[in-house]
Image: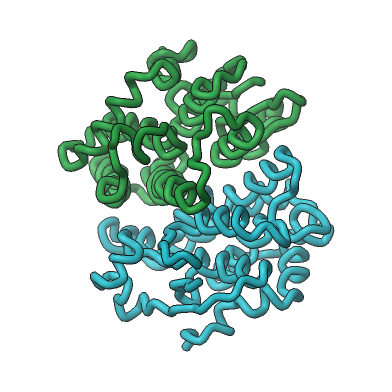
Chain colours: A green, B cyan
Amino acid sequence: MELYTYYRSSAAYRVRIALNLKGIAHRLVPVDLLAGEHHSDSYKAIQPQGFVPALKTERGDYISQSTAILEYLEAQYPQPPLLPADSYAAATVRSWASIIACDIHPLNNLRVLKYLTGELQVDEQQKNTWYRHWIETGFTALESQVRAAPYCFGEQVTLADVYLVPQVYNARRFDTDMTAYPKIEAICAACNGLPAFDKAKPESQADAP
Amino acid sequence: MELYTYYRSSAAYRVRIALNLKGIAHRLVPVDLLAGEHHSDSYKAIQPQGFVPALKTERGDYISQSTAILEYLEAQYPQPPLLPADSYAAATVRSWASIIACDIHPLNNLRVLKYLTGELQVDEQQKNTWYRHWIETGFTALESQVRAAPYCFGEQVTLADVYLVPQVYNARRFDTDMTAYPKIEAICAACNGLPAFDKAKPESQADAP
């Protein structure tokens, strides 16, 4: 397998964690977003939107969108499971992942921030306030629901943790005050103590500056 | 089952379609977003974020987030399937659903539009341009990938169609020029010819004005 990645892309970070947790042999292929490599014809043949991540599967097929990639990995490599066996428990985990995947992350994407400061002439301070607003709204919802015992859902690492840790990394980059989210902080500390999470960190990547 | 819904919520619309396609007996419980019913303590006990939809399952549990609800329905009520059996094919369908669920819809949510016109003092025209921009970007990606034969993935109705039809409804509401997306238009016409989609339409809902 090959994962097209960028060290600081939180969607790529999610997939790096999952590949490590499941012990799936893979090669990381960095895509230099700063140099505009994602706009190249060769990359768009792999991921037509020019987004990272993209996964080249063991059969040579390409999959886009981290949510789709993570569900694929879960179906093809069920051990260790990243979703509880019970459908309702799995729905709870997926609903937490969705708070990040749908309610926070899409609003803070680079293309969105560029639209704000470009087309809408939003200044730097307003942009940072926007960024933190969606994190704070989403984290408030998560903090009231997750278990932190020690992971989001309890003793099993799940997709919720896989989504949460990269989002907390982004929150810290934009100086979000994390003191209101002690459970989220504790979950992150527990996750980052695991080699699968540690190895996936942005600063540990080959393409980190 | 009970689905907490609002006639014009496209996330609720997705779930209404899926419940109909699977023939699952359910009751629709309208939540009046205009009257602020979603901010009430009683609704927040069901869905802590105050978002629709929320599903009350056959066991009396509540599930939030349409993505989680749809995966739950697929796992618990596999017939008719809304995902292809092959994992890679399912990933393709989920990646299309994700373009809508993550790249379009979150940016055009009411709470986001309110932030734009409130905190950021964006005017009506800029707001509408923003709305259409994310639809056009996402629909361009989808148009190049979906099959329209006659549905997104071919002869089988899938989750991709379940996400697409409500998004097209929103696109039309905001006067998006759909002529650039003939495949998407054809898919919608095919879907809307099915009773499951027709019955789920906003204008057919009990809470539609």
Q: Position of residue A84 (x, y in %)?
A: 48, 41
Q: Position of residue A182 (x, y in %)?
A: 19, 37
Q: Residue at x 73, y 69 (%)?
A: B191
Task: Let me know if residue A149 appears in the view.
Answer: yes
When the figure is inspected, residue B142 is found, relative to residue A180, above or below; the finding is below
When the figure is inspected, residue B201 is found, relative to residue A60, above or below; the finding is below
In-image side of B209 versus A165 (left or right): right
Q: Position of residue A110 (x, y in %)?
A: 43, 37
A128, B125: nearer the viewer: A128
A47, B86: nearer the viewer: B86
Q: Residue at x 37, y 36 (%)?
A: A164
Q: How many marks?
A: 0
Q: Position of residue B12 (x, y in %)?
A: 50, 68
Which residue occupies the extreme left position in the image?
A179
In-image side of A142 versus B77 (left or right): left
In-image side of B167 versus A41 (left or right): left
Q: Residue at x 69, y 30 (%)?
A: A46
Q: Residue at x 62, y 71 (%)?
A: B24
When the figure is inspected, residue A101 is found, relative to residue B123, above or below; the finding is above
A159, A106: nearer the viewer: A159
Task: Let me know if residue A118 appears in the view.
Answer: no
When the figure is inspected, residue A164 is found, relative to residue A189, above or below; the finding is below
Residue B160, image quadrant: bottom right
Residue B61, image quadrant: bottom left
